[in-house]
């Protein structure tokens, strides 16, 4: 099988552990599902392209706080990289210049650095809105229930309101 080794470093040449590598083999004679992996403490990971024949593919490296990088690779018929032997990836840190962060990044209030923005799901967004506005939502639901009761059975509603208010009919 064709193995694709990666070596990931920061802007100063130091190994970067925990970098997410997404690899996809280009369509052709030997197509496989995309493969994902993470670099070890030395900034290294080797991913299989699932192909014993010559193949090409793409990769993308991402780590919060660093610029996402991408590129291509080519594996020969015997499974070795036809380029330098290892895909070398340099990931410079995303620095805040006091201005706005690049798209997809937000400024960390503690450090002032730009970090990759998280993507909460729709349920978390709705729960956050309900949690922040629970009293308003409760009042609105009571008002809607009273309006529906008034429109649905106006006589019953007026007699109930009269009984509560102390006026007998």
Image: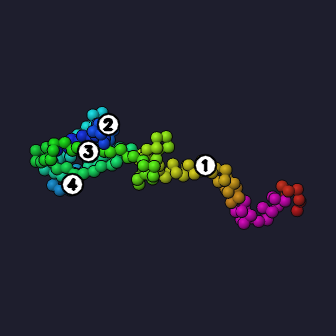
Earlier in the chain: of badge 2 and badge 4, it is 2
Q: Dot 3 corresponds to which residue? A: 89
Sequence-wise, which precedes: disc 2 or disc 3?
2
Q: Give the alpha-carbon distance from disc 2 to disc 3, as whole Å.
A: 12 Å
In front: label 2 or label 1: 2
The quarter of the picture where residue 17 lies is top left
Q: Which stretch appears magenta?
A: 146-162
Residues tagged 2 and 1 counted as in contact (Cβ below 8 A): no
Which residue is at the far left?
78
Q: Name the residue under label 1.
A: 132
Q: Can residue 119 be seen by looking at this rendering?
A: no
Disc 2 or disc 4, which is closer to the eye? 2
Q: What element carries label 1?
A: helix
Label 3: how many Cα within 10 Å (few below 14, some 14–19, many 20+): many
Q: Left of 137 or right of it: where is 120? A: left
User: Going 63% across and 51% down the picture, which residue do you hit?
Assistant: 133
Is 151 covered by the magenta stretch? yes
What mark, if any, has residue 26 been given in the picture? Answer: 4
Q: In this view, does 118 lie to the left or right of 88?
A: right
Which residue is pictured at 70% across the width and 62% down the height?
148
How many numbered discs? 4
Residue 165: horizontal and vertical position, in percent? 85, 56
- Label 3, label 4: how many angstroms apart (C-alpha)? 20 Å
User: Which label's residue is closer to the chain start, 1 or 3?
Assistant: 3
| Residue beneath disc 2 | 17
Find the distance from the CA under tag 2 to the CA under tag 4. Answer: 27 Å
CA gap between label 2 and label 1 equals 38 Å
| Residue 33 point in image, percent of width and height | 25, 50
Give the main secondary structure of the magenta stretch.
Answer: helix
The image shows residue 18 at horizontal and vertical percentages of: 33, 38
Relative image position of residue 108 (x, y in whole percent) = 47, 44
Q: Neighbour class for label 1 at 10 Å: few (<14), some, many (≥20)? A: few
């Amino acid at each position: 099988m064709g193995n694709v080794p990666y070596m990931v470093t920061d802007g100063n040449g130091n190994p970067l552990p925990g970098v997410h590598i997404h690899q996809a083999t280009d369509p052709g004679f030997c197509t496989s599902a995309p493969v994902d992996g993470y670099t070890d403490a030395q900034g290294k990971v080797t991913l299989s392209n699932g192909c014993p024949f010559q193949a090409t593919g793409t990769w993308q490296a991402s780590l919060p706080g660093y610029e996402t990088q991408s590129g291509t690779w080519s594996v020969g018929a015997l499974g070795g990289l036809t380029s330098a032997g290892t895909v070398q990836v340099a990931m410079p840190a995303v620095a805040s210049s006091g201005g706005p962060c690049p798209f997809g990044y937000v400024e960390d209030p503690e450090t002032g650095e730009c970090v990759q923005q998280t993507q909460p799901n729709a349920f978390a967004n709705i729960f956050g809105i309900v949690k922040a506005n629970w009293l308003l939502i409760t009042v609105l639901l009571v008002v809607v229930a009273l309006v529906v009761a008034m429109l649905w059975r106006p006589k019953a509603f007026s007699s109930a309101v009269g009984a509560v208010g102390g006026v007998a009919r």
